Amino acid sequence: MNSVSIVGVGLVGGSFALALRQAGFAGRIFGVSSQPAIDAALVRGVIDEALSLAEAAAVSDFIYLAQPIERILQTIGVIDEHIRPGTLITDAGSTKVAIVNRAAGAISRGRFIGGHPMAGKESRGVEQADADLFRGRPYVLTGRDQGLESWIERIGARLVVMTAEEHDRLVAVTSHLPQLISTALASVIGAQPDSAKVAGPAAVDLTRLALSPYEIWRDIFATNADSVDAALSSFITKLEELRASLRSPKMERAFEEAASAAKALRR
Amino acid sequence: MNSVSIVGVGLVGGSFALALRQAGFAGRIFGVSSQPAIDAALVRGVIDEALSLAEAAAVSDFIYLAQPIERILQTIGVIDEHIRPGTLITDAGSTKVAIVNRAAGAISRGRFIGGHPMAGKESRGVEQADADLFRGRPYVLTGRDQGLESWIERIGARLVVMTAEEHDRLVAVTSHLPQLISTALASVIGAQPDSAKVAGPAAVDLTRLALSPYEIWRDIFATNADSVDAALSSFITKLEELRASLRSPKMERAFEEAASAAKALRR
């Protein structure tokens, strides 16, 4: 890997650039982004130079797409004619099936491996970029490449290789379902006048995700609706089971099972 | 208020005793509890003296019941014959209708006002007692008493007066529903092999309550099942609405409403 282009120089793209540098990457890092993002990235030294997508594609052997999902899909649709043969392209989108399928149809001169770093911050933008953003966090790849895997490990992330389908099914449960739960809970609490008077830490903690901006979630739901629907269905079934057990000793077993699962998540 | 008995000297009862002292209460504080709790409370100086319930009731003009709900119900059933006329009794149970109703039928020589401090810690026991546990947190009373209200304010809590029915309906939404949501989510995540591999902070945060021990919740569900059932029903209805909006622009409005409600909870 000699020259890298980051397409979409925000929190994730900028952090990946900084993480590569910290991990010893000595080549050029190009940035493709909006003018304000480019200006901020140059000031912080996150990228070496700003280029257009076509220019960047022509001079890179590794291209990192860190845009919103819909923009990643668009970029994949136009990038193939600009790249050098054999260029490795990956992305950081929150869903994988739609992106990997689009790449399979659109990228023939390069190689595409889907990616999803399970890392983020409450604030966005390259101003928040952090070389340690990925440290200790899962980083999913939907295919294998020795060079890419080695960099993922060198930036401190925990490499996880799985299919795009498996990824989307799992994050529907571990990420997209929690978002919808938090949104629904905030609405139900908000519909009760005076509820804020008695709200304790449980209500505050569980409604934190409800503060998330919709703009990120529109694309996630659009590209993972079937898995999210299935996750909601499983969750509602479980809630109905608990509801039927409110006055039953079965609830104790349900609490024990759930506590075991919650502990397993923390190991 | 000259002499106080704390019945159930654990985290909440012990913290109330410490908070009274810190707020300037100069009278005697008696403790009624299990021997290990009494020993720990005496070592920490949380109480002045251990008595039996009958002894404590006979020498106190204020009695604070900080036991589990079922034990509070039992204590209320037997305490009236032991108290001095006019003694003020309150409690710290997490549900109020069952307790207030029991008191209305069982306490005639004293006065009973239900209470619920919205405060706690992950660890329990008088060893964790803290004079500042109630500071800045809501403290619900189901009736009015100038002396009691004044002490609630002097220990730094935010006094909230409402009926037992209103309390139980609201905490079903703000506290009991979040617990069941967390329990259900942990179960659904646990049922997906490999989900821990991709679980991020959202999954970890939303399953924290699932680690709660069932012994506290058994009594809460037993004494607030109707309101919890209604809260689950509202929540499931909202989830079904979101599920139907996964591919619809309606989702944006739902996110905006929920974000407003989540912000209101934080004001």
Image: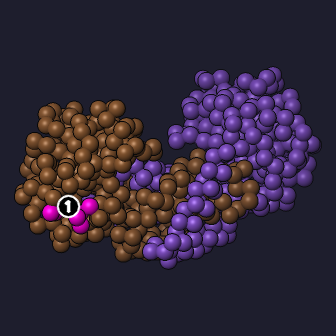
Chain colours: A purple, B brown
Amino acid at circle 1: Ile
Q: Main secondary structure of the magenta part?
A: helix
Q: Quadrant of residue B103?
A: bottom left
Q: Position of residue A236 (x, y in %)?
A: 55, 72
Q: Closest to the observer: B116 or A169?
A: B116
Circle 1: element type? helix
Q: Position of residue A91 (x, y in %)?
A: 75, 46
| Residue A122 to residue A186: above or below | above
Instruction: Identify which residue is drawn at 22% across, 64% down.
Output: B78
Image coordinates for residue A226, horizontal then vertical, percent = 67, 69
Q: Is residue B264 above or below residue A223?
A: above
Q: Does B77 appear in magenta?
A: yes
Left-right relation of B141 to A212: left
State the residue in front, B261 or A199: A199
Chain on which label 1 sits: B
Residue at 77% x, 60% y is: A166
The residue indicated by pointer 1 is: B79
Residue A224 in the image: above or below residue A266: below
Task: Identify the magenta region.
Answer: B75-81
Percent position of residue B118, x then y: 32, 51
